[in-house]
Amino acid sequence: MDNRWVGGEQQRRRAITFGTLYRDSELAAPFHIECVALENPNKVPVVLSGGQSGNGGPRRSISEMAKAQGIDPARFDKSPFSVTELRRAIANGVPLPMGRAIAKAVKAALSSERRAA
């Protein structure tokens, strides 16, 4: 799954795996992640933990990294973490648009499972 498929600016691919309690696939709730019709016209390079852009560009600031992940950079103004720790946490996190799309799909699958029960 790519962050740009759900409206994000950063091209960030993640492998998403889900399991089920049911052994019979017919009992598993349907799971669908809604994608946008067209990718976001703004394209931001992937955020790496060293702060570089995915295209080998110059090191980005914490603020630029947070913006690329869809996070408000002001949330990191008074962080108790070192710059290195912040870079790792931001770069390893799931971009906000992708996280929201996954959460929406999980919520829909759970509600359809409850209706079926």
Image: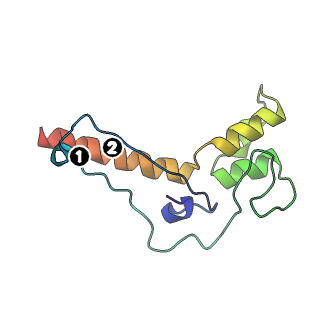
Q: Nearer the viewer, mark 2 or mark 1?
A: 1
Question: Is 64 drawn above or below residue 77 in the view shown?
Answer: below
Where on the picture, by quarter, is residue 46? bottom right
Say which label, 2 or 1, has the lower sequence index.
Answer: 1
> How packed is label 2: few (under 14 Cα within 10 Å), some, or many (20 or more)?
few
Q: Which label sits on residue 29?
A: 1
The secondary element bearing badge 2 is classed as helix
* Residue 48 on image: x %, y %: 74, 50
Task: Tell me which amino acid carries mark 1.
Answer: Ala
> How packed is label 1: few (under 14 Cα within 10 Å), some, or many (20 or more)?
some
67 sits to left or right of 58: left
The number of numbered badges drawn on the structure is 2
* Residue 38 on image: x %, y %: 49, 74
**Residue lying at 64% horizontally and 60% vertically, measured from the top left:** 10
**Residue lying at 72% horizontally and 45% vertically, measured from the top left:** 73
Which of the pair 33/25 is nearer the observer? 25
